[in-house]
Amino acid sequence: MNLIQIDKQTWIKGIEKIKSEYQVFGPVKEKNDVEFKELGAGQMPELNFQNTRMSPKAIVYPQSQVMFTYSLDETREDCRILKEAKRDQTPRAIIGIRPCDALAFQLVRRNFDSPEYQDVYWINAYESTTMVGFACNQPCATCFCTSAGTGPFGEKGLDVLMVDNDGSMMAKAITPKGEALLHAAGWTESATAGNLDSLKSKAESAVSSSVATGNLRQKKIMDVYEAPFWEAEAFSCINCGTCTYVCPTCWCFDIQDETHGKSGIRMRNWDSCMFPLFTIHASGHNPREHKYERVRQRFMHKLKYYVDKYDNGIQCVGCGRCIRSCPVNIDIRRICNKMNAFDPQSCSCEVASS
Amino acid sequence: MTANTEKIRQIAKQLLKEGKVDIIIGFRKGSVPMMNQPLIVTAPEDVDELIWDSNCALNLANYVTNRKEKIGIVAKGCDSRNLVTHIVENKVTREQLHIIGVPCTGMVDRHKINAMFDAEITAIEESGDSLTIKGNGFSKDLKKTDVLQENCAGCTHRNPVIYDELVGDLVTEQKDVDPYASVKQVESMSPEEKWNYFEDLISNCIRCYACRNACPLCYCPTCFVDESRPQWVGKSQDQVDVRTFHLLRAYHCAGRCTDCGACERACPMGIKVREFTKKLNKDCLELYNWEAGLTLDARPTLDTFKPDDPQDFIK
């Protein structure tokens, strides 16, 4: 694939050109952090950041999304008929997504776009989106992407990979969608690979933490489920939704109707398996009554059920956001390594003897 | 290892060995700088995980709610005040607790320190009143007193108010501080300015409820935002619902809040949620001469009626 060279002037012009054809999202500095926002005229994606506080999943899968509208006005013919809300299918581009977050969309796709179920809201938005990645020259201490299926220069899930090479950009189109975007930007000057390989290996070796996942698949579900460490590991958890909301691969939602006067909407909102409300039954019974059961669910889903169901690795891309944002320092690396190393035979607990 | 850490381990080991408590609740060193993790220790041989430094800012009273065991708990000033509140509100009994009091010199503000550096902080070292912040290719010394959490900087109850033993000498309480300086600033604003100020304050709230859940006061079996019959509050990112959550959460803490700062520290978005609760603390002080969690002998001020309560604010 051809490499494209983009100098600073062409960069600014190109971004503006892209904005005329796409709705463009990029990292911007906001309130002491960097978040993905829609870029207005003249606004450039921030280049000096490690990763955003929130993942870019909301661009495809908003925290609150209207699915249907309805009227309760008896005088209207369409009273009580759900009408599909208009879906925005404007081509959009995420410029500056990190390789981990791009891979996350591929993981989430297994849920939203499967042979059994197609979630039109997610699929429409996903298909309208071109992912332009920024390689990570400086991963965070909490990043473990290289043991979670990608890397700081990973290409999976990206349409274009860009590398910031001493102030000028090198771009590589990975898909036809990516080629179309480069074309729209007017970026055509070809480049030689130069020191690309050494930048890549330097970045990969800068990823200093990792998770061990090799044994997860062969473990028996019930062995790990009944492992003795869950209560102690969950002790500090306060059951807030931070980990699930900042996670690029958490996909659970809740559907709600909201009526104002005689008109209403049916919407879906991100939900979190950390909340007791997530599983409480109408009877009042809650099958995940205790917080350790909810903590266990989150990790079992990501690191065992998903692994078993799709045979495609863990449901985690190693972005490290949950580690950085957890108010009580629950660290997925620690839990994953515990699960991976757990041996019921060597455990003197009830699980082993029963 | 600080002297406090050493003493906490020693006391915890003794308590567990002698069977005076079933569990110890304290902190262990976190896997991320400035993030220590609440920890439960049940075996005397595990006490060496316990630590104490300026990153033990969460409120451990949050972890004793409705527990039935005999609990040894490490408590700085604000934790002890919330233990008092818990005892008064029947969430735990005094007899259940062995309080290991830690006179406190304040906790550092992780949001503030993170915002001071463009690059990632990978380590923080502490020695007395000085902190060394380290990252990839940089190292900077800071004075701890310059980067305290706002509630700690204005704290007037650094010493535990109840305890069974202390890990060190009591510290001198701060006298010439104004815990309500920022409330006064907001009070001086016009209604429109106030509205804009609070709108901006909560504009990036993701409704994860970390503020609520880090708070020892929030122990309702079902929180008002989780009620579904009837549903009091909508679930979306509608600003009306976000506002409702923050305002009602604050009002539920009125007369009970010790300004421990756990809510603000826990917020993943760095929202200054104490801006809501602090105003109510100030009102309680001015109207009823009441500060929460200082005595086992009185119910929280909004929980009681006295014939001589001021009433001229009732219109």
Image: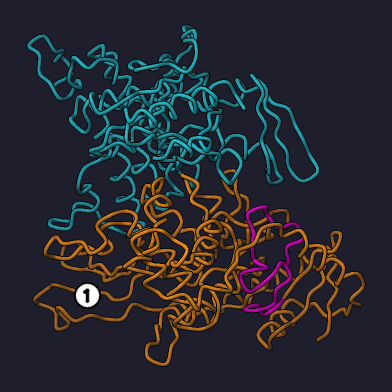
Chain colours: A orange, B cyan
Q: Residue visible at 53% across and 35% down?
A: B48
Magenta highlight range = A135-160
Instruction: Decide whether residue A145 is among the magenta residues.
Output: yes
- The quarter in which the C terminus of chain B is drawn is top left
Residue depicted at x 32% and y 59%: A293
Q: Position of residue A283 (x, y in %)?
A: 11, 64
Q: Secondary structure at mark 1?
A: strand
Q: Please, what is the dominant secondary structure of the magenta stretch?
A: loop
Which chain is disc 1 placed on? A
Front residue (pair B133, A309) = A309
Image location of residue A28, percent across then percent down: 62, 55
Q: Position of residue A305 (x, y in %)?
A: 42, 75
**Is A313 located above or below residue B119 in the figure?**
below
Whether residue A70 sits left or right of residue A12 in the image: it is left
What's the residue at 46%, 69% (across, down)? Answer: A302
Where residue B289 sits, quadrant-wise, is top left
Q: Looking at this view, is B251 or A245 the one in front?
A: A245
Residue under label 1? A70
Q: Nearer the viewer, residue A296 or B178?
A: A296
Residue A100 quadrant: bottom right
Residue shown at 85% from the left, 73% from the top: A5
Q: Is residue B187 above or below residue A258?
A: above
Is B62 situated left or right of A175 in this image?
Answer: left
